[in-house]
Amino acid sequence: MKHYYDNKAEYVLINREEPAKSLNLNKFYKLTPKSITLRDKKADQFYIWKTDLSVSSANTKSTNLTPVLANATSFQPHQQNILIYGTVDPDNPDSTMLRIRDNNKDYDVREFPKSKLLLDIVKFDGHWYASAISPTEGRLYIYKDFVQKVDGKRKNALVPYNILKLDNPVELSFSANTRFVMAQSRKGVAIYDLEEDERHNFDFKEQLLKGQLATWMDGHRITVNRDNMLEVFEFDNQNRRTLVAITANSLPFFDRDYERLFTLAKAEPDSKTKTTNLNKTFLKLNLED
């Protein structure tokens, strides 16, 4: 968990069964990182991205860090030993190279104008999909089985599987089932459906405020905060619904079966208190705890 306080941030590993055994990772490793990410979704293994742009691997058994990457301007891990990242070569400081590291071997994918790339890599339906977009270029590049094609010396290995256009992107993400990749700006989104080979580009009703993001609810639906009300709609912008009130700087939380929704919301205007409440909403009729 990333905990914000006094204009600072720290990472805390929370033990839900024994809270007293929770671990403040900043204090444990004696550093203030840019980010800490789980390695292979394991709660005792991490990738630590430091302020000098280096990436190290770590675990809770030791405070030792193992160097993994240097000068990583952005990165995303997948499984145990796969990383997609952007890096700037000191000999070519005006560009950013997109790379994939697979089992300690680096593959150059594409050169972009110098920028902090938005990127990710996932596996869907037996194939690997790497995606990246530069905020200064505005093109979402999608690569399919890049490493496998390069190792197999395929002639089309460096050719993108697809390219989508989106100006001024601020975020890139895959849906929970990894079927959809979405690049978004404050104005709208560009979505690619890996299963149906379809594109969906649309604008939001109103431009999002700075810092606000549309987020995936599940494998097909997207949520967004609109005037402190939670809206949900399909990946193709259909079936838009307004659900409940939500504070401007929080995200919704759904239970595993999407039957209960938890949100932070201000107390009703006529309330005697000015507190922020944690609310629970049942999304299914005749449901009880």
Image (cartoon, rainbow, N blue to C red):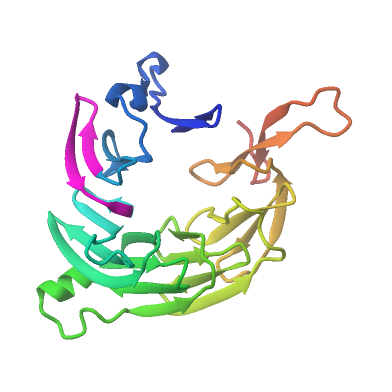
The location of residue 215, given as percent across then percent down, is 54, 54
**Residue 114 belongs to magenta span:** no
Give the quadrant of the N terminus: top left
Q: Is residue 61 magenta?
A: yes
| Farthest residue, direction top | 20
Query: Where residue 180 appears, x then y in whole percent?
Result: 44, 66
The percent coordinates of residue 284 (x first, y second) are 64, 46
Report x, y in % for residue 36.
34, 38
Residue 138: in sight, yes or no?
yes
Foreground of the two, 213 or 223: 213
Q: Main secondary structure of the magenta part?
A: strand
98, 104: nearer the viewer: 98
- How many numbered marks appear? 0
Identify which residue, 138 or 240, lies in the foreground: 138
Q: Which residues are magenta?
A: 55-73
Outermost residue to the bottom:
155
Q: Which residue is rendered at x = 45% and y = 61% of the image? A: 172
With respect to residue 190, does 215 lie above or below? above
- Residue located 29% across and 58% down the image: 85
Q: Quadrant of residue 17?
A: top left
Q: Quadrant of the C terminus?
A: top right
In this picture, residue 283 sits left or right of residue 118: right
